[in-house]
Amino acid sequence: MDSNYYKDYFDLERNHWWFLARNKIIKAQVEELFTGKGESLKIINVGVATGATSEMLANFGEVTSIEFEQDCIDFTKSKIDIDIQIGSILDLKYPDETFDLVFSFDVIEHVENDQLAASELIRVCKKGGFVFITVPAFMSIWSQHDVINHHFKRYLISEIHVLFSNVLTRKYVSYFNFPLSIPIFIVRFFDRLFPGFIKRKKTDSDCDLAPNPWLNKLFYEIFKSERVFIKRKFHFPFGVSIMGIWQK
């Protein structure tokens, strides 16, 4: 991401509806995988940004946090007490089969060689362990939001299956953020059709588009409601993002 963006990103990860709801959904899925097992898990979280996901995952075990940008690491450590190691998803400095849980939330789209990124996540996962990823969906809704976040692409389910499902046992792979996908598609369509039509306040990301606290709460509740459907393993036909969980 842009060097100044992560300073705003810290607040976004902890207050914006999209991050809050996404993390609620992720946490519910991890709880379902390990409820009642009473084990302390060895976890790696690759691409932690400003650390909110690692704070959440610490409820489940010992978390190794990896981030690519040293400036982002320094900034995050100045804000919260967290150990973050510098590293790349393309070259994880850990032996094969080190971790019970391997997470990478909205990271794979940041690298051109996504096949290598996927193979590294798979490599460091223990046999019987899980790989859990999220990525943005559909190049048709590419926007300035993707540019400022330094994305290489947005994905289709079929492309994610090629990266992971041909190697690992699929537990759940689906589009998500479904109810809000239509308005997001419309906003981004007009943003491409009429550049400058959509006014963003600070970061040029879509996170600037719903600054009203009431709207933030409403969108949070709508997105968070998907937990019920995902728990029942419902597969959404489309959405803004993709979630994938596999077992090795």
Image (cartoon, rainbow, N blue to C red):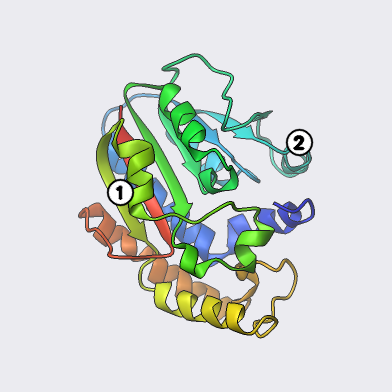
Q: Answer yes or no: do the residues labelled 2 and 1 have beta carbons within 8 Å?
A: no
Q: Would you identify the image quadrant in which residue 196 lies?
A: bottom right
Residue 223 appearing in the image: yes
Q: Is residue 246 above or below residue 224?
A: above
Say which of 172 and 116 sits in front. 116
For numbered disc 1, what is the local secondary structure? strand
Task: Name the kind of residue labelled 1 in the image.
Answer: Val
- On screen, residue 136 versus residue 78, left or right, reads left
Res 93 quadrant in image: top right
What residue is drawn where x is 67% and y is 56%?
Answer: 9
Q: Name which residue lies at 38% across and 55% down.
A: 156
Picture mark count: 2
Find residue 219 and name its label.
Answer: none
Q: CA distance from mark 2 to mark 1?
A: 32 Å
Visible in this render: residue 61?
no
Residue 181 pos. (x, y %)? 41, 72
Residue on which disc 2 sits: 70
Q: Nearest the camera: 35 or 236?
A: 236
Residue appearing at x 35%, y 58% in the figure: 175
